Image: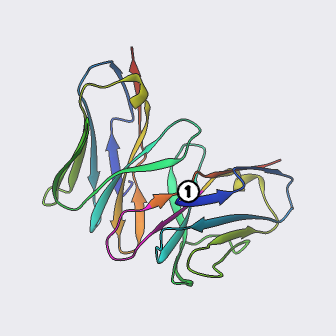
Amino acid sequence: KNEVEQSPQNLTAQEGEFITINCSYSVGISALHWLQQHPGGGIVSLFMLSSGKKKHGRLIATINIQEKHSSLHITASHPRDSAVYICAGLNTDKLIFGTGTRLQVFP
Amino acid sequence: DTAVSQTPKYLVTQMGNDKSIKCEQNLGHDTMYWYKQDSKKFLKIMFSYNNKELIINETVPNRFSPKSPDKAHLNLHINSLELGDSAVYFCASRNRVATEAFFGQGTRLTVV
């Protein structure tokens, strides 16, 4: 079992829908990253959070330390949001990655 | 003014060859990493250096040798390449005191 689990593995949505991706972890972490990777592309850090909630534009990330759970929400989804979203926990000096969620948003 | 830059972006080479991938960051970070992304897109740490010193080595074959000439550079040298080394390799950097990681654009290595 992976130390960082994500769900769902694959997600399709219609443009405009509200999207939630979940991340649970079983190891101690000091912070959690949400990362975005477009097909054939590099990895971009969307958020790093260690408590509470952060918001950038249409993206919202929350974390519950007690429950060892984080969520990434996308409001008013758009086809350009189609990508793989990866959560990663910072454990000591290294990131432990989830398996990723492949999101496709159709017009 | 790319923050973390890797070269080359693509590398195709034959089994048995030796190759290097270079990484440079201009963010003033003190910690740099190499991560490997397999064919299923799963990322796993290989190495981490802090101020030119190796701090993480995750049971990577010793054909892989990282070198950090200064804290802005972390290069990855691979000897005797094997088919199973084909993957995308990502360099990343951060400051050890709780800042987010920044990633390079990745190097797609194909061993034929």
Judge whether A65 appears above or below B68 on screen.
above
Judge whether A18 appears above or below A57 on screen.
above
Which residue range is magenta in the image? B90-101
Q: Secondary structure at mark 1?
A: loop
Judge whether B100 appears above or below A75 on screen.
below
Q: Which color scheme does this rendered protein use?
A: rainbow
Seen at 23% across and 30% down, the residue is: A75
In front of the other: A72 or B42: A72
In front of the other: A92 or A52: A52
User: Crowdedness of circle 1 by 10 Å Cα count: few (<14), some, many (20+)?
Assistant: few
Please say whether residue A28 is visible from this viewpoint.
Answer: no
Q: Amino acid at mark 1?
A: Thr
Image-based side of B15 in relation to B100, left or right: right
> How many labels sit on residues?
1
In the rendering, at what x and y percent does residue A46 appear?
A: 35, 48
In the rendering, at what x and y percent does residue A21 appear?
A: 29, 38
Give the residue pinned by disc 1. Answer: B2
